[in-house]
Amino acid sequence: MNPASGQDAPLLVAQGLTRLYGTRIGCADVELEVYPGEILAVVGESGSGKSTLLSLLSTELAPSSGRISYRGTDGVMRDLAAFTEAERRLLLRTQWGFVRQNPEQGLRMAVSAGGNVGERLMAVGRRHYGDIRSEATDWLGRVEIAADRIDDDPRSFSGGMRQRLQIARNLVTRPRLVFMDEPTGGLDVSVQARLLDLIRSLVSDLGAAVIIVTHDLAVARLLSHRIMVMRHGSVIEHGLTDQVLDDPAHPYTQLLVASVLAA
Amino acid sequence: MSEMPAITYNFAYLDEQTKRMIRRAILKAIAVPGYQVPFASREMPMPYGWGTGGVQVTAAILGTDDVLKVIDQGSDDTTNAVAIRSFFQATAGVATTTRTQDATVIQTRHRIPEAALSDRQVLVYQVPIPEPLRFLEPRESETRRLHGLADYGLMHVKLYEDISRHGHIATTYAYPVSVAGRYVMDPSPIPKFDNPKMNESAALQLFGAGREQRIYAIPPHTRVVSLDFEDHPFEVQRFAKPCALCGARGVYLDEVILDDRGGRMFVCSDTDFCETRRADGHVGELGVAVPSALAGKDAA
């Protein structure tokens, strides 16, 4: 099943992914595959293990058991546990992106917008100031931040602008896989709508795969091709987004869908 | 050797075991150029910030036949320089000098002497904050990881910010360098004017940070490159006029206020260099010819 592109090989595969916090379950026995260019939404209520899953997939947390494999640009599937830390860091700032719910965590608040966008470029060895700056300007334009704000630091930005800046900072290296943790959380609905529109057009331009964690079913419906519903750390239902949301099979999913106000 | 001091200290103040410990750290630092080696820094009879790191390194390498020179901001006669010089006179009884070419060990704060150093000289720097990434990344655990992985993109973010705010790289001292193509290092708060002198220097360069408990080194003839951008290359400060006393050009100058009507002059920050030139007969626009008796030459 691969709705977004003709490529058959998955980009990221998780098998039996489990994380325990002592005896408490963070997430248990999660299986998933993400294909190039597709958007996978992970939904569920607070405490259902969505964020734990995202931390595991992005190697921020080590799994208690299970394995995650990633297909590099060379087409070879490799176990992420076998990556050295240097390789893992390179992956995180070139082929991957991570957009956090709270932009203060994903941005350097004391560094100008241009510096924030340019950081990844400099981290991979770009040393031409003019080029870095023009690329940063280009990306600020793509996320609808005026070019004359390039030297302002994000503390002077509104919540929506900060989130857009964080997206630009992550997408500047044209990542193949982007993790998003509630990217529209805490924003008012009109700003949310524009941000979702932006995310959708940017990732389709780049052809990036996205794993997006959200508790908002409307966000999932708007953005994602496939959806996974989590509860108590386990995946209870997954499938095509419209199929799951319009015809939920599991009683909990039915409850979740029914509790959305005019979705 | 001069007469024994009234209170007898072990040679150069520190006990032999401590000196061995510091020497081991120094050897490791020389073996891994630019890498900050932790060491068990001792309390010294002076406050932190007055060169306790440099003093411990000097104490560990000093021998009885060494000739010590101590400079502070290029000058031999400022408080810090005088205090440390007399400290080693009292505790080690070694010969001291103000002449750069006569010294075998030069302890310095904020400058590198103008005269080229030779392979029989060791330059010891006093370092307040050894970590070049400190103000970008406050966590020590993280900066160590960044050094370990040679992950120095952050350093350029700092330079980027400089250019975007000021139109040029506005960092003028403690300008970060890459040592032997591997570690990024803080050269201590020397002006960036002195950075090129570190590159391929014939002298051994040792850096001691007492409060932060780190020693690092640049072995002789090691490549030291100041970080920059391709379109904003590293540049040193330039001075419009030569030294007012000795007329030297291409040296680092200090501003001296002359009166309360805006009068000022710029003179060599390296006092020994300036005096040597004046003794050789060079005179700047505000200078006077040095009488030969004062110049240390035979009277005519």
Image: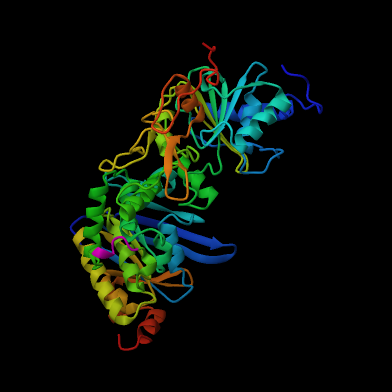
**On the picture, is A97 further left or further right than B260?**
left
The residue at 31%/60% (across/down) is A151
Q: Tell me which residue sits at (40%, 36%) in the image.
A: B193
Is B214 above or below relative to B157?
Answer: above
Prevailing secondary structure of the magenta residues: loop
Quarter of the rendering occupied by the N terminus of chain B: top right
The residue depicted at 27 percent of the width and 77 percent of the height is A193
Q: Please give left or right for residue A134 compared with residue A109 in the image.
A: left
Q: x and y percent of residue B144 in the render?
A: 51, 44
Residue A105 belongs to the span the image colors magenta: no
What x and y, as percent, mark residue A9? 26, 53
Q: Does the magenta stretch include residue A149?
A: yes
**Residue B87 sits above or below residue A20 on the image:** above
Q: Is residue A63 or residue B73 the one in the foreground?
A: B73
Residue at screen point 34% across, 46% down: B169
On the picture, is A192 further left or further right than B12?
Answer: left
Task: Kindly tell me whether residue A94 is visible in this rendering.
Answer: no
In the rendered image of this protein, does residue B225 appear above or below residue A212?
above
- Counting from the top left corner in percent of width and height, residue B150 is at 42, 40
The boundaries of the magenta stretch are A148-152
Residue A158 visible within the image: yes
- Identify which residue, B100 or A226, lies in the foreground: B100
